[in-house]
Image (tube, rainbow, N blue to C red):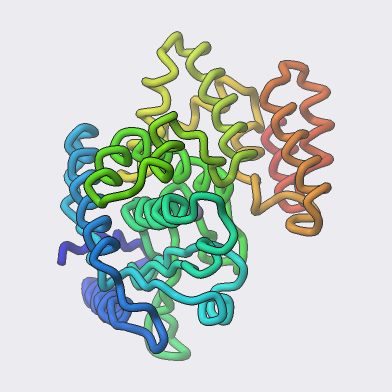
Amino acid sequence: MKEKFNISGKNLSEESKESTSDFISGRVMVGAEKIEGEYEKEPMEIDFIEKINLAFEKEFEEMQIDNDKEITPNQIHILNDQLYKENFGDSDGVDVCFDESIFINKEKIIEQYNNPRVKYLKVLLHEMVHSQAYKKVHSNFDKEINHNQITTKRLGYRVENSEELNHVHFLGFNEAITEKITSEMEGKYFEDILEELGFSEDEMFEVKCGSSMAPAYQNQVDIINIIIEKIAKTKNEDEQVVWQRIKKGYFTGDMMHLRDVEKACGKGSLRMLAAIDSGMKDLPRTENIRYKMYRQIKEYFESDDNEHKDKLARSVLIEREKMKYDDRKK
Ligand SMILES: [Zn+2]
């Protein structure tokens, strides 16, 4: 298997680097092992995973990215509702970064959604996109315990502060990009794939009519679309060009182009973008508050009135991020 992880760390010796690499390889091996109670994968599911691997191959070729990572069916674990919730809580699916493994709550998806089989494959694809994202771990030799403390540093655009627990940047941005890539691939490949897998006309209907299925992370995606539009205007580029650059960075780790956000949306706007879902006040509390927050963030990126923007930032950001936002303005 090709080593996909990049490793960073202060004064990291060759030896430490190697042991970190060994540690991750061990985790990846464990991540591909069956867990007790998981569903046996159906031939259709294995077929789908293989077809998505081929689709990724095409994508990487188009983007001129050197990546031959394949996600094997063993790395994907299909669970019932109870087993999933015990381990991962109330989501549809999750990508476990270290282990390169994916878990899906199939039972929940099948019960909760219209057109559940298509939705299920869409969730599977979303998690496979996460799994293909740029990944970097931070390794720090800890004298007291005499081994390396290894933490996730980057996953796609998501950045974790290795010194401070739960200090994450670009969480919502990363999900929005993951979902945009998922929708794009769905548009490009799903019709053919689902036909080959023998899906019925009814099931195919929404897919054929374009992506009518409500995407996940709609608010975050809306915000990113506003930003892309603004960057395109500022740089006098096609929106598709801007999007392709952002998409490529998700897989290569390049974040330099995010400086375009500051140029297009004003000083401090990158701080605001980084805070979506991880530096916002009153986070998951209630749908109403969340909705208001997202509306304010949209307004922030749409507005050219600096005073109004600062007011919105102050209303949305938690203290830690607000201080940095204000620093930035000086
Ligand atoms: Zn996701």
Name the residue rendered at 56%, 64% in the picture: 111
Of residues 148 and 130, the one drawn nearer to the viewer in this rendering: 130
Q: Is residue 191 visible?
A: yes
Name the residue furthest front: 201
Of residues 52 and 315, the one drawn nearer to the viewer in this rendering: 52
Name the residue rendered at 53%, 19% in the picture: 229
Q: Position of residue 155 (x, y in %)?
A: 42, 55
On screen, residue 227 above or below 161: above
Q: Is residue 16 visible?
A: no
Q: Position of residue 279 (x, y in %)?
A: 69, 51
Name the residue rendered at 51%, 62% in the picture: 110
Quadrant of residue 102 within the rendered picture: bottom left
Name the residue rendered at 51%, 19% in the picture: 231
On screen, residue 94 above or below 179: below
Q: In this rendering, would 273 be left or right of 93?
A: right
Q: In this rendering, would 181 be left or right of 330?
A: left
On screen, residue 229 above or below 99: above
Of residues 84 and 298, the one drawn nearer to the viewer in this rendering: 84
